[in-house]
Amino acid sequence: MEPRPLPDPDSEELAALVGSTSQRLLYGLLYRRRDHPPTMVELRLFAAQALGEDQSQTDRRVRELRRYFDVVAERRDGEHRYVLRGWAEHPAADGAPISLRRRAEVLAPQRCAMCGRTPLEHHVTLVVDHRIPQSWGGSNDVDNLQPLCEDCNAGKRDYFHSFDAHADEIRKAISYDEPQRRIGALLAAFEGKWVRSDLIGIVASAKEYQEDWQRRLRDLRFFGWKIEHQNRHNEGARVRAYYRATAIAPIPDDIPGVIRAETARRKAAGAARSARTLED
Ligand SMILES: [Zn+2]
């Protein structure tokens, strides 16, 4: 089957899809530069000069385009370049992506899932948030939706923006079936850099909720991974946990089998050690 052709930047088709002029201009740049995709620096300059926008808006603009189009950050010649590859696999349906009924169901607790504030007591406005953003492949399933106040939602959005350059790798990590493989792919994508625990928790729980994702993370050590942990106290009121992989190894096909075998081997080695100690 022929891939659906991308709309011309000046077409009615694009205008019907993307309401914002700035967004369409940005699309135009990505469209014209498909053979020589722009870097983030170029996109930001374009946003500042052609759109008169603050450069910090660029990440958000790109993310919004991803609702319809497959825009990926690819590393080429040592730089992340933004490539318009085609239509998104499941372009967002316009209008009501989440049904009113589902929206009401998600908002029913009337309490922000992050800070616990309520409209009644704290006069906050609640919005429906995707735990895993749609741009990372998150769905409109009720399990992936939560009520957040606007402050927490904006904070989360800014925080997630900072990973836009890794969006492809995160999307890939999320797509794996086993939590250990998802966590491993995420840590590997960050190439030894510290990863904040809430991002790991989200990726670990992408397919089914992981009550103890830290344990799944520790499982990686059975496969030869070295994981470091650090708590940081200097980020507001909360203590933040970070993890990084300083050594990675292939993750076996039979994850539970290898964990069982390795646990038994370590137990036997421990028993042999204590037996030797007794003999001495
Ligand atoms: Zn909140």
Image: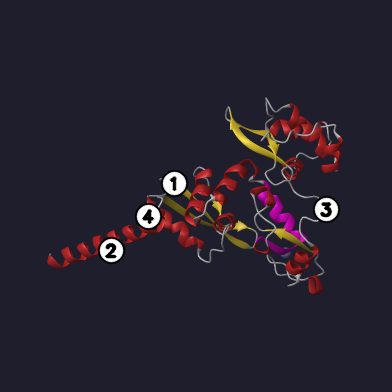
Q: Name the residue under label 4.
A: 222
Residue bounds of the magenta highlight: 144-161
Return the residue at label 2: 267
> Pointer 1: what residue?
246
Give the foreground label among 3 and 1.
3
**Amino acid carrying mark 1 in the image:** Thr
Lower position in the chain sequence, tag 3 or tag 1 = 3
Quarter of the figure that contains the N terminus = top right
Viewer-nearest of labels 1 and 2? 2
Q: Which of marks 4 and 2 is nearer the N terminus?
A: 4
Per the model, the C-alpha gap separating discs 4 and 3 is 48 Å
Residues packed near mark 2 inside 10 Å, few (<14), some (14 to 19) or many (20 plus): few
Would you say residue 158 sits in the magenta stretch? yes
Q: Is residue 243 left or right of residue 111?
A: left
Q: Earlier in the sequence, mark 1 or mark 4?
A: 4
The residue under label 3 is: 95
Numbered disc in front, either 3 or 2:
3
Q: How many labels does the image show?
A: 4
Q: Is the Cβ of the residue at disc 1 closer than 8 Å to that at disc 4?
A: no
